[in-house]
């Protein structure tokens, strides 16, 4: 397949935005896959801040990082991503060049615990205030469940209303797949 799948494309976007030595954010650590990926692009001189409200997600992520010997590149917080600027050290704020949000619920976890558009929007607003020009936020939107539909609608409205003088916004996804395939909203600060 010549077209990149959604998660592959999300990583391509982040590789273009985040460089060795940068600060990156995994706003929903889940099983730790994105956190681990971000450690590979920030390298030993960079740092990743990871967030999840579920203890199980933080535990799984920590195990994955320990297994790859990259725990020293990551700080994990068991809190909502809407609190990110409260807990990320102020000195690192202007060096945050990339962030990923894998929305919905924890795979193989409690499906009643889901992300919500209001907290995601609050986190995106915070990131856009501190990121340098070219800083990029990738939202992977899973909307195949009732709460996901509500979140999708809120995020699309928010993204469409962002001032084009302040950000580029891209939507990427496959439109001929069944069962509400995930899609990406990518926001690059101008």
Image: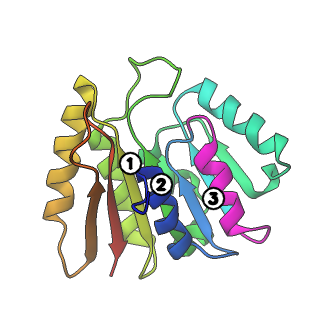
Q: Position of residue 48 (x, y in %)?
A: 65, 58
For marks 2 and 1, give the one nearer the viewer.
1
> Which residue occupies 37% across, 52% down?
139
Marks 2 and 1: CB-CB under 8 Å?
Answer: yes
Quadrant that contains the C terminus = bottom left
Residue receiving disc 1? 140
Q: Position of residue 53 (x, y in %)?
A: 51, 31
Residue receiving disc 2? 100
Magenta residues (range): 30-46
Quadrant assignment, res 182: top left
Residue receiving disc 3? 38
Q: Earlier in the sequence, mark 1 or mark 3?
A: 3
> Which residue occupies 60% across, 30% down?
57
Question: Does residue 136 show up magenta in the picture?
Answer: no
Display colour scheme: rainbow
Alpha-carbon span between mark 2 and mark 1? 8 Å
């Amino acid at each position: 397949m010549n077209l990149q799948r959604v998660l592959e494309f999300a990583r391509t976007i982040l590789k273009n935005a985040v460089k060795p030595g940068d600060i990156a954010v995994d706003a929903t650590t889940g099983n730790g896959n994105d956190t681990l990926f971000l450690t590979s692009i920030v390298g030993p001189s960079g740092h990743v801040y990871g967030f999840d409200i579920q203890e199980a997600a933080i535990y799984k992520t920590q195990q994955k990082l320990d297994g790859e010997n990259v725990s020293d590149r990551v700080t994990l917080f068991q809190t909502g991503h809407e609190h990110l600027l409260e807990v990320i050290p102020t000195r690192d704020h202007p060096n945050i060049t990339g962030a990923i949000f894998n929305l919905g619920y924890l795979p193989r976890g409690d499906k009643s615990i889901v992300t919500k558009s209001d907290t995601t929007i609050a986190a995106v607003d915070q990131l856009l205030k501190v990121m340098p020009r070219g800083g990029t936020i990738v939202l992977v939107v899973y909307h195949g469940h009732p709460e996901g539909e509500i979140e999708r609608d809120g995020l699309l409205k928010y993204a469409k209303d962002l001032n084009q003088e302040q950000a580029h916004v891209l939507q990427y996804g496959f439109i001929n797949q069944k069962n509400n395939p995930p899609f990406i909203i990518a926001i690059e600060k101008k």
